Image (tube, rainbow, N blue to C red):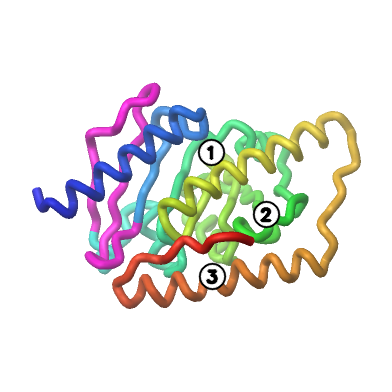
Amino acid sequence: MDASRTAIEETLGLAAARLAGKGLLKPGDTLSQRIPEQNAVVLTHVTAGQDVPEAFVWSDLGGTPMDLHHMIYGARPDVGAIAAGQFTWTSMLSRLDLSLPPIFDEQIRQLGVEGRRVARRAADRSAFPALQNGANAYCLDDISICLGMGLERLLLNIEILEKSAESFVLAAGAGLKVRRIPWLIKFIANGRLKKDQKDAAERHLRGERSILKAGY
């Protein structure tokens, strides 16, 4: 195998093991990464415990989309990595039939103004248009989806998503009033996210990796 592909698989496998070790991904969940310099996508399934996955599937981004990951990459050039599966707290939103509202500024800054509840299963192609609104978090009937502009950003985003969903679910379950972020802060935070996404999309389309932006 090409040495560069081996290194890419090792990095993705370690990321999968890290997320599984923290309980953020579970066996059977999927993790993928855009490889813009090869116009390709590499995907792996999370295995038991903290084991590093051994199987990786490569696909050409220029080919016919074969799965939901491939479809999202094709429609969202800003996206550089995707995690999909049974996230503990985010998946509870589907049971409550709720979207995740904007409750933390960092949540809005990295995930968008809403973690949208999409009342469809992942295999239902009619759900796909709802995943193209620029957000980085969605909750379908059978899986939750978290997006990032790169693999490092995704690892941070999924932690933000789960912590935000946990806070909201516990508060809503206790009957507490959940305060929303003021519109000006929401506007500024989301505007910075869109700026970063534009930069990431331009880099990916040039065959370059996106850059992890530091700070707020």
Residue 51, percent from left and from top: 32, 26
Q: Of discs 2 and 1, which sits in the foreground? A: 2
Distance (Cα) linking label 2 and label 1: 26 Å
Residue sitting nearer the eye, 178 or 129: 178
Which residue lies at the image location 65% right of the left edge and 53% below the top edge?
116
Instruction: Report the residue that reaches farthest toward the top.
Output: 49
Disc count in the image? 3
Distance (Cα) linking label 3 and label 2: 14 Å
Which residue lies at the image location 35% right of the left edge and 75% below the top edge?
205
Residue assigned mark 3: 196
> Few, some or many C-alpha atoms within 10 Å of disc 2 (few <14, some 14-19, many ≥20)?
some
Local SS, label 3: helix
Task: Please report contact status of discs 1 and 3: CB closer than 8 Å, yes or no.
Answer: no
Say whether residue 91 is magenta: no
Local SS, label 1: loop
Is residue 103 depicted above or below 52 in this figure? below
Is residue 8 depicted above or below 113 in this figure? above
Task: Please report contact status of discs 3 and 2: CB closer than 8 Å, yes or no.
Answer: no
Numbered mark located on residue 142 in the image:
1
Which residue lies at the image location 45% right of the left edge and 27% below the top edge?
21
The region drawn magenta spans: 34-59
Residue assigned mark 2: 106
